[in-house]
Image: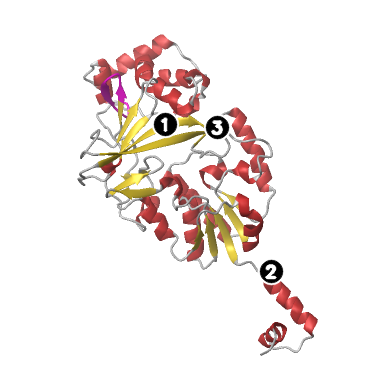
Amino acid sequence: MPNIMEFVCELVNTKTEGFKCFFLLYNMSMINEYDYLVVGAGLFGAIVAHELHKKGHRVLVVEKRSHLAGNIYTEEVLGIQVHKYGPHIFHTNKKEVWDYVNQFATFNDFINMPLAYYKGKYYNLPFNMHTFEQVFGVKSPSEAKARIEKEIKEANIIAPKNLEEKAISMVGTTIYEMLIKGYTQKQWGKACDELPPFIISRLPVRYTYDNNYFNDAYQGIPIGGYTAIIEKMLQGIDVRLNTDYINNRQALDKKAKHIIYTGEIDRFFEYEFGALEWRSLRFVEEVIDQPDYQGHAVINYTEYEIPYTRIVEHQYFEPGLKHEKTVITKEYSSAWRVGDEAYYPINDEKNSALYARYVKLALERENISFGGRLGTYAYYNMDVIVEKALQLVTSLLTE
């Protein structure tokens, strides 16, 4: 049997000297095992991996958690698809985005219509004519507008300097005190007059009896849960769970020509300039031995004295299904420390400046792309994640 050097020489059909064959063999050993290494198996990473694989590229996906799908991970409990990291309702105004996700699953017709609980009573969200009737007793849009405009005028806020002033300038003092103030303080761990106004700039206010929280044309939840979507996207792709890229980067960097990194950008650079700040969440899941618990998918608890921000009853994300038992999750907002799960970026002036410094570092690196909410220090709806992932793939394939 020929030795390895002789085999290589025969393979290239040449009688070159042994040292030339050795040089060829050395170069072969330096060829990357994969074209792309995708760090993170959430929605962004899965789409990028799927599209690159579809184009014939060799892709490896590594995920530090024990499961796929990132924060949209769903798990079946007693026949109910439980949203383990908080409720996720897919919504978009773009048909091409809707068509894209629908190739991986059939979506139901769930409409997001959350309620707010305050001092023993329930109120409709988003703020609409139902809410205004419940709070003020008004019966028409003109009455509701007059009442709210009166409160706004009395507050005399010309240029809102913080979240509290911004909210009052939009819905008046009464609704702010009842349905915004306590919830927001729990969510962000700060008084509302210490928070920037942009946090609440997209607050929906309607003078109609429309309870649909979103204005988008397309909305729903995948039948069978989000995890099945990610599994389908990653079919045929090498995936390694329980693999933290940062702790294994020396070995993993050798495996691919290009890295797509969807983890925390500051952690990638070993917190060279300090840690970006986030808010975290804690989820307490309970199985209730009765057919239903609150009769609704999502109820926000707006009193500051109630420690959790909302209760989710997962069976109501699946319209029409009946269960003997139900599963609920109480959601608590919490302070974040390095090493905790990061959910909501604190995009204030200080953190925005810090992020800009990390972006500058990232631009100096070759053969790496940052994406997703952690990699770009941003909070995105899922439809935006789809768009940004597809945009990145296009840019990679046109380089």
Nearer the N terminus, badge 3 or badge 1?
Answer: 1
Please indicate whether residue 289 sits to the left or right of residue 75 in the image: left
- Specify start and end residues of the magenta stretch as a single range: 117-127
Q: Quadrant of the C terminus?
A: bottom right
Q: Amino acid at mark 3?
A: Asn
Location of residue 272 in the rendering, given as x and y in whole percent from the top left corner = 69, 39
Q: Nearer the viewer, mark 2 or mark 1?
A: 1
Q: Are marks 2 and 3 in contact (CB under 8 Å)?
A: no
Name the residue beneath numbered marker 2: 30
Rendering quarter of residue 243: bottom right
Q: Could you classify mark 3 by the number of other residues whose Cα lies within 10 Å: few (under 14), some (14-19), or many (20 or more)?
A: many
Please indicate whether residue 58 sits to the left or right of residue 4 in the image: left
Q: Amino acid at mark 1?
A: Tyr
Q: Are marks 3 and 1 in contact (CB under 8 Å)?
A: no
Q: Amino acid at mark 2?
A: Met
Q: Is residue 149 inside the magenta stretch?
A: no
Mark 2: which secondary structure? Answer: loop
Q: Could you classify mark 1 by the number of other residues whose Cα lies within 10 Å: few (under 14), some (14-19), or many (20 or more)?
A: some
